[in-house]
Structures are given as structure tokens and as C-alpha cells.
Amino acid sequence: MTEPNYLLRVDEDFDVEYPGADATSAECYVNVVRAADQLLGELARRLRVEAGISTTAMMVLATIDGLGGRSTPAEIGRHVVVSSAAITSLIDTSERKGYVRRAPDPADRRRTWVALTPEGRTLIDRLLPGAHQVETDVMSALTSAERLELLRLLGKVQHSVLRVAQQPPRFAPAPRIRPARLDRI
């Protein structure tokens, strides 16, 4: 039995509709984004049911745990890669739920530490194994060699994103040639 094909594909006339664009680049891009959305969506679904928290909230707790049980909001933000306002909100929510506590740094009054509470440590100790099991279950569709190849390719894509992000933010001037199949109204 063959696996169903879940890939999104562009129309056959893509190269005519978008001169200068590449059909396989568009297909890869949309399918990487779609896969990431599906992966995060499944983790989010499980976290909502299991603990009533978001994936970013879990990432904050896991980051604090991975940094030895306490960290500064700025350091947490560097690891979680969200804005400082979002980190503040996530820490506020986690503090209200009793998962973290803030404490001033006695050596530097300008610095605040965020530490896991015993409840936060218990929660992250319960959630991380489940999150890793989801990763294992999803990636079991690939052989070990395929997973290594996927990592290599994703590394190239991530490097390319960083390169493209250094360019001025503008779209290419090539026009779209609207195909007749879209004008069936």
C-alpha cells in the first residue's frame, strides 16, 4: 500500500503565471511552512489538553529548566526567540499559574531572575518526555539516515533564510500573468 501524498503542489502553468519564479522552490517553501505549522499545531493541541499551556509557555519553562532552573528574561528571550514584550507576558502568565517566580538580583538591582517553582519543575518534568515522544513518533516515518539528511537540508535552508533576511525587504518586480483558469466567475 502506498502512502497518501500530502504535499501541496503548484499548478502546471506556474512558470508562465510567475515568470522568473521556480515551481519547486515554491512547493518546497509552502510544504516546509505547512509541516512546521502541523508539527507545532499537534504539540499545541496536546499541551492544551494536558496542561492548559501554549507551546511558547512550555518553551519558556523548558528554557529556564535547561539554564539551570533560573535565568533572566533577556536570556530566556534569546533562547525562545520572541519579543521582549511577549516574554514578559509569558513570564507574567507563568507566574500567575505558579510555575515561575521573579526575584531581584541581590548583586545588581537592575536585574531580575526568573526561577522555576517546584510546581513549574514538576510540570516541565512531566511535559518534556511527552513532547519528545511526539517528536519521535512523527519522525519515525524517516530512517535514521533520512533524519540526518533532513537536518543537513534544513540547516542549508536556515542559512539561506538568514542570508535573504540581510537583503532589503522588497518583492521582485516580475509581474504575474494571470491565467484564464482563474477567471471562471
Image (cartoon, rainbow, N blue to C red):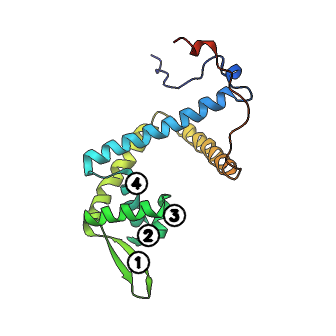
- Residue toward you, 22 or 138: 22
Q: Within the image, what quadrant is residue 87 found in?
A: bottom left
| Residue picked out by circle 4 | 56
Q: Looking at the image, is mark 1 or mark 4 earlier in the sequence?
A: 4
Q: Quadrant of the N terminus?
A: top left
Label placed on residue 112: 1
Percent x, y of residue 44: 35, 45
Label placed on residue 78: 3
Asked if labels 2 and 4 touch by Cβ distance under 8 angstroms, the answer is: no
Task: Give SS at disc 1.
Answer: strand
Hey, which residue is sitting farthest front in the picture?
Answer: 185
Asked if labels 3 and 4 touch by Cβ distance under 8 angstroms, the answer is: no
Percent x, y of residue 60: 40, 60
* Mark 1 → mark 2, Cα distance in angstroms: 7 Å
Q: Within the image, what quadrant is residue 116 found in?
A: bottom left
* Mark 4 → mark 3, Cα distance in angstroms: 13 Å
**In-image side of 103 versus 146 (left or right):** left
Vertical placement of 141 versus 126: above or below? above
Task: Give SS at disc 2.
Answer: helix
Q: Amino acid at mark 2?
A: Pro
Q: Looking at the image, is mark 3 or mark 1 earlier in the sequence?
A: 3
Asked if labels 2 and 1 touch by Cβ distance under 8 angstroms, the answer is: yes
Q: Amino acid at mark 1?
A: Thr
